[in-house]
Every structure is written in C-alpha cells, then in structure tokens.
C-alpha cells in the first residue's frame, strides 16, 4: 500500500504545479478566440503577438528594468552583505541587519504606497524625480531587490572560511586586491543566484510597479493584468508560453553548466 | 483582503490619506506578532 501511495501523491503534486502551465501552452495554439472553446491548432496568436506594438514595448521595458535593477541591486546588496558579515564594529549594525529583512516580509502594497508618497513629496521639495516613469520604477525595484540579494550573499559570506582572506592579507595583498581576487570568485555562485532572483522578482512585479509608474512606462505584468481584466485573450497565452520556453531553456543551460563544473 | 481594500482605495477612489491609514493598520497587524515572537524568543534564550 505504501509503495503505491507515494507515486500517486507525486503525480498529484506535479499535476497541481504544472497542470495550469501545460493548459496555458496548449490553449496558446487554439484557433478559436474564446479561451474555453477548442477550435483546432493554429499559430496565429504568435503572429498577432509580435504584431502587437504595446505588448512588445512593455516586454522590452520589463527586460530593461529587470537587467538594470538586478545588476545595481547585486552591487549594492554585496556591499551591504560585506558590511554585515565582515566588518565587526559598525554603529547600528544590528539595526541594519534587522531592517534589511523588512522588504522581504513587507506586503507589496505597503512598499509601493510608501515609495510613491516619498517620490511625490521629493518632487515637490527638491524637484527630483520629475514625474513618475522609468526612473521611479528602477529605484523601487532596486530597493526591494537589494534586500533579497543581501540575504543570499550574506549567507554565503558567513559560510565562507575567512582564514583564506587573512592569509592573503598576511602575504601583503591590499584589502581591495583581496576582495577582487579572493572573495569575489568565492561568492560568485551566490552573486549569480542573487542576480537571477532579483531579475525574476523584478520581471513579475505588478503591485509596486503599478504604484510608482507614470504615463508612458507600462511594464509587461501591468499590460497582462489590464488585458486579463477585460477578458483573457489568446495572445497573452502565446506570450506566456514564450516566457515559459525562455525560462526552461535558461534552467536547462544552467543545469548543464552546473554539471560540467561539478565534474 | 485588506490589500485589496488598499488597492481600490488608492486606484479607485484616489483617496491617498485613507490608503496610507490602511497601510499603517496593515503594518501593525504584521509587526505586532513578529515583535511578540522576538520577545518570546529572547526571553527563552535568557533562561
């Protein structure tokens, strides 16, 4: 009984996780415009998707925001993690360490609303940022991505053996040289996973972007959300299938690279 | 859902002060259990 029960449960688990994605991909090839009616196979929604200027622009903007905010957040997050782990005597370190987990547990609506209020009052006080758009979305994404990167890098840094760094210092390397030659290569896996995490979070963030964006800056999740409210259209299915494809290819490539490295 | 209330208050009614008040209430709802938990943990560590 026990031997038969486990595979069935695993099947249910996989079906629960991947059933919606599979149905999404199948319905992206639907000929009919109605999502619930099957009208035969067709790839016309993919053609329509690439012809849709609004969606393509939003996708490009989202990618741009994702790459920039993940890169900046990785730099800032690494600096933050270095301070929290390596520097022993920094005033207010305990408070900082506690507060860095704030954005992780804070609901998106609160982060979005408070950033918006900050931007509005900054605009009326010092005149920057003028209006809301790409800049404000970037600042908001960097803010919450930084916290996630910090947590990832922090755990890697505190696991690391710091006697290697001390040996390099003893042999006469300057602290800067030690950081770039010893520390950075050792925390590279954490940097990559932190960057990917930040990129993913930035790409699928709807709530914070909606709060801080202005006219002319519409990210992909915002376009999808506003379209779905008017009724699900099949070109969104096509877009989502392409994203699923891109993510799967990325995962397969990283798995192959990981396997090569471990050999 | 309190988050949905905040969302409609901001995007639907354009009532920013009420939205801010809802956000503060939400923050308190979230922070108080965390602080109670932290206090309980630090008390446990002292004994």
Image (cartoon, grey):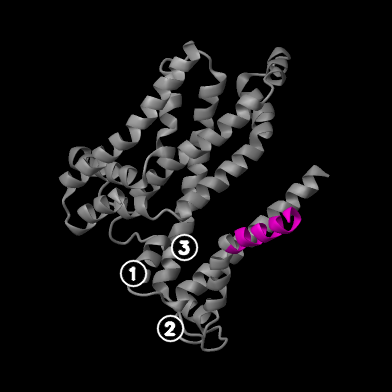
Share a chain, discs 3 and 1?
Answer: yes
Element on which disc 1 rests: helix
Task: Tell which residue pokes out farthest to the front in this image.
Answer: A1
Q: Earlier in the sequence, mark 2 or mark 1?
A: 2
Label placed on residue A229: 1
| Position of B21 relative to B41 (above/below) | below
**Residue A27 location, x and y as percent?**
53, 78
The residue at which mark 2 appears reads as A34
Name the residue located 56 percent from the left edge and 30 percent from the top edge: A154
**Residue A100 location, x and y as percent?**
44, 31
| Position of A190 relative to A233 (above/below) | above
Chain hosting mark 1: A
Inter-mark Cα distance, 2 to 1: 15 Å
Q: Earlier in the sequence, mark 2 or mark 3?
A: 2
The residue at which mark 3 appears reads as A60
**Residue A133 location, x and y as percent?**
32, 54
Query: Residue B33 is drawn in which quadrant?
Result: top left
């Amino acid at each position: 009984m026990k031997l038969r029960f486990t595979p069935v449960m695993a099947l249910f688990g996989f079906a629960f996780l991947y059933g919606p994605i599979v149905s999404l991909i199948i319905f992206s090839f639907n000929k009919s415009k109605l999502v619930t009616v099957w009208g035969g196979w067709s790839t016309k929604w993919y053609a329509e998707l690439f012809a849709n200027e609004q969606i393509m622009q939003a996708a490009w903007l989202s990618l741009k925001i994702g790459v920039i905010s993940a890169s900046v957040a990785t730099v800032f997050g690494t600096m933050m993690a270095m301070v929290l782990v390596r520097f022993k005597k920094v005033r207010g370190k305990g408070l900082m360490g506690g507060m860095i987990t704030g954005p992780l547990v804070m609901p998106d609506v609160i982060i979005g609303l408070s950033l918006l209020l900050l931007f509005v009052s900054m605009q009326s006080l010092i005149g920057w940022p003028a209006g809301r758009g790409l800049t404000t979305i970037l600042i908001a994404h960097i803010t919450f991505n930084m916290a996630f990167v910090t947590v990832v890098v922090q755990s890697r840094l505190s696991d690391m053996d710091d006697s290697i760094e001390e040996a390099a210092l003893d042999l006469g390397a300057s602290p800067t040289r030690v950081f770039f030659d010893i520390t950075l290569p050792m925390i590279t896996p954490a940097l990559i996973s932190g960057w990917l995490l930040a990129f993913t979070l930035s790409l699928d963030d709807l709530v914070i972007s909606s709060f801080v964006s202005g006219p002319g800056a519409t990210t992909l999740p915002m376009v999808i959300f506003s379209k779905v409210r008017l009724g699900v259209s099949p070109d969104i299915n096509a877009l989502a299938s392409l994203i699923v494809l891109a993510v799967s290819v990325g995962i397969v490539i990283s798995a192959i690279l990981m396997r090569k490295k471990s050999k | 859902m309190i988050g949905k209330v905040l969302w409609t208050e901001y995007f639907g009614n354009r009532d920013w002060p009420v939205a801010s008040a809802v956000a503060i209430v939400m923050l308190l709802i979230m922070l108080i259990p965390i602080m109670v938990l932290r206090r309980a943990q630090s008390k446990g560590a002292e004994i």
